[in-house]
Image: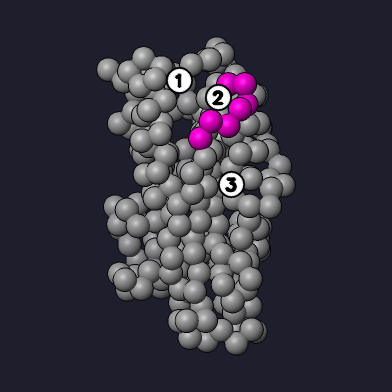
């Protein structure tokens, strides 16, 4: 666990807490934020936020608010997942809880698509969605953005990279699943990268309004 002094303004070298207990996600955001004069920190160990929202944006806001209030610092949260058209948007906000492990989640997804007769590409349309929320130290959400990547669910897993549903999420324009892409390509076309691209100019504007980034 770490302890931070309360930060009221978003200034250069302000601590920014990533509202996640996932070390990989914290590293990913640290890399995305590397060009900004912020001190990126993980959320305190043992802090859990119940994700009760009906949408990705709802859950991102819940996490950002709770972590900001708990730490007294600015907090950045994300919530993301897969929405499949033939399954009425499922697994949606339940993507991470669809089954106990990644292979089981993929197996369930493919089985449910087969059960509804979604056999060709048009029937298997899907989108990866990421919502980001930035809260100030009082817990007030100051920014929210969303990024989407459109694709289709492949007939079987392809590729060995990534995690989650990446092996079955195919981006038709590239002819690759997320699991077959290198990190740079996935970062460019992926939902989280697109969400961050929408957030970054707003974040820079907040920094500038607070006294510049020099």
Q: Which of marks 1 and 3 is nearer the N terminus?
A: 1
Toward which corner of the image does residue 201 lie, by quadrant? top left
Position of residue 94 in the picture relative to residue 24 (left or right): right
* Residue at the limit of the structure toward the top, as seen here: 5
Magenta-colored stretch includes residue 171:
no
Callout 1 environment at 10 Å: few (<14), some (14 to 19), or many (20+)?
many
Asked if residue 11 is positioned above or below residue 143 in the image, the reply reads: above
- Which is nearer the eye, 27 or 185? 185
Colour setup of the view = one colour
**Residue 23 showing in the rendered view:** no
Which residue is label 1 attached to?
Answer: 10
Which residue is label 3 attached to?
Answer: 57
Give the magenta part as a residue range: 137-143
Residue 88 badge: none
Looking at the rendered image, the quarter that the N terminus falls into is top right
Q: Where is residue 30 in the image (x, y as percent from the top left)?
A: 40, 35
Q: Position of residue 97 (x, y in %)?
A: 66, 57
- Which is nearer the eye, 78 or 205? 205
Asked if residue 210 is positioned above or below residue 116 in the image, the reply reads: above
Magenta-colored stretch includes residue 141:
yes
Q: Which residue is drawn at 63% across and 45% down?
A: 59
Q: How far apart are marks 2 and 1 (CA)?
A: 8 Å
Asked if residue 9 is positioned above or below residue 153 in the image, the reply reads: above
Which residue is label 2 attached to?
Answer: 136
| Residues at discs 2 and 1 in contact (Cβ within 8 Å) | yes
């Amino acid at each position: 666990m770490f302890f931070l002094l309360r930060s009221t303004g978003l200034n250069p070298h302000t601590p920014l807490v990533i509202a996640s207990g996932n070390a990989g996600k914290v590293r990913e955001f640290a890399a995305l934020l590397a060009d900004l004069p912020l001190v990126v920190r993980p959320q305190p160990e043992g802090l859990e936020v119940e994700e009760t929202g009906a949408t990705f944006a709802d859950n991102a806001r819940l996490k950002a608010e709770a972590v900001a209030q708990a730490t007294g610092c600015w907090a950045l949260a994300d919530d993301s997942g897969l929405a499949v058209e033939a399954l009425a948007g499922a697994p949606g906000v339940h993507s991470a809880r669809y089954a106990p492990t990644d292979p089981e989640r993929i197996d369930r997804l493919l089985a449910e698509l087969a059960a509804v007769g979604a056999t060709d590409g048009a029937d298997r349309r899907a989108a990866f969605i990421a919502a980001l929320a930035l809260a100030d130290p009082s817990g007030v959400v100051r920014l929210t953005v969303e990024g989407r990547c459109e694709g289709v669910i492949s007939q079987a897993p392809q590729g060995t990279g990534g995690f989650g549903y990446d092996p079955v999420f195919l981006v038709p324009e590239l002819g690759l699943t997320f699991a077959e892409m290198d990190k740079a390509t996935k970062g460019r076309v992926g939902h989280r990268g697109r969400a961050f691209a929408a957030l970054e100019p707003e974040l820079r504007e907040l920094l500038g309004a607070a006294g510049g980034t020099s």
